[in-house]
Amino acid sequence: MEPRDYLEASLEVLDAAHQLREALNKHALSAVGLTIEQACALCRIDMAGGTASVSQLAAHLSRTENATTTLLGKLVRNGHLYRERSQTGDKRVVYVRLTPQGEMTLSQFRSELMGMFQKIADPPSPASDLLLAAQSFGALLAQLSP
């Protein structure tokens, strides 16, 4: 394959990834009132047992702590999360917890997400296909990161 072909294929992958994210974001907003980024934050908190620190989330979401704090602030104002300071150790550490409303919205989001993927692939693609795609994007990102 010629370098120009690699470039063209790479641009098509990036464009497709962007379009997929935009379509998912639009659908999530209309279905459950969350952006994909907000839904990912709720998912990460849930995967951490319902509670996570801002710094943990920032690392998982590949965002700065300031950007993560802003994102979480919107979720707190909308009643999906609540904040609390560490009761032990470093009092500067802030944790966020899912509220019952946040758990319900997250459940709705997961149902919507599964519904979207079922429309794309019926029966749904195995999780291994999604994992392979995520690993491929992760490998590309690793090569581009300093």
Image (tube, rainbow, N blue to C red):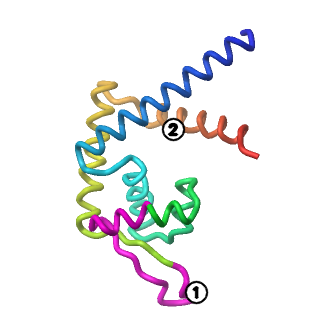
Q: Residue at x 31, y 68 (%)?
A: 77
Q: Where residue 78 appears, x then y in whole percent? A: 28, 64
Q: Residues within 10 Å of mark 1 (few under 14, many from 20)?
A: few
Q: Circle 1 sits in a helix, a strand or a loop, which is it?
A: loop
Q: Residue furthest bottom?
A: 88
- Asked whether 21 or 121 is in front, the reply is 21
Q: Amino acid at mark 2?
A: Leu
Q: Label 2: which residue?
A: 131
Q: Amino acid at mark 1?
A: Asp
Q: Residue at x 33, y 25 (%)?
A: 120
Left or right, 1 with respect to 64, comes to right
Q: Earlier in the sequence, mark 1 or mark 2?
A: 1
Q: How many numbered marks have been drawn onto this rendered protein structure?
A: 2
Q: Label 1: which residue?
A: 90
Indicate the quadrant containing the N terminus: top left, top right, bottom left or bottom right: top right
Q: Residue at x 30, y 65 (%)?
A: 80
Toward which corner of the image does residue 113 lie, by quadrant?
top left
Toward which corner of the image does residue 81 lie, by quadrant?
bottom left
Left or right, 143 with respect to 138, comes to right
Q: Circle 2 sits in a helix, a strand or a loop, which is it?
A: helix
Is 66 within the magenta? no
| Segment tinted magenta in the rendering | 71-93
| Mark 1 touches mark 2? (CB < 8 Å) | no
Q: Where residue 108 appears, x then y in whole percent? A: 24, 50
Decide: is 46 above or below 6.
below
Q: Of discs 1 and 2, which sits in the foreground?
A: 1
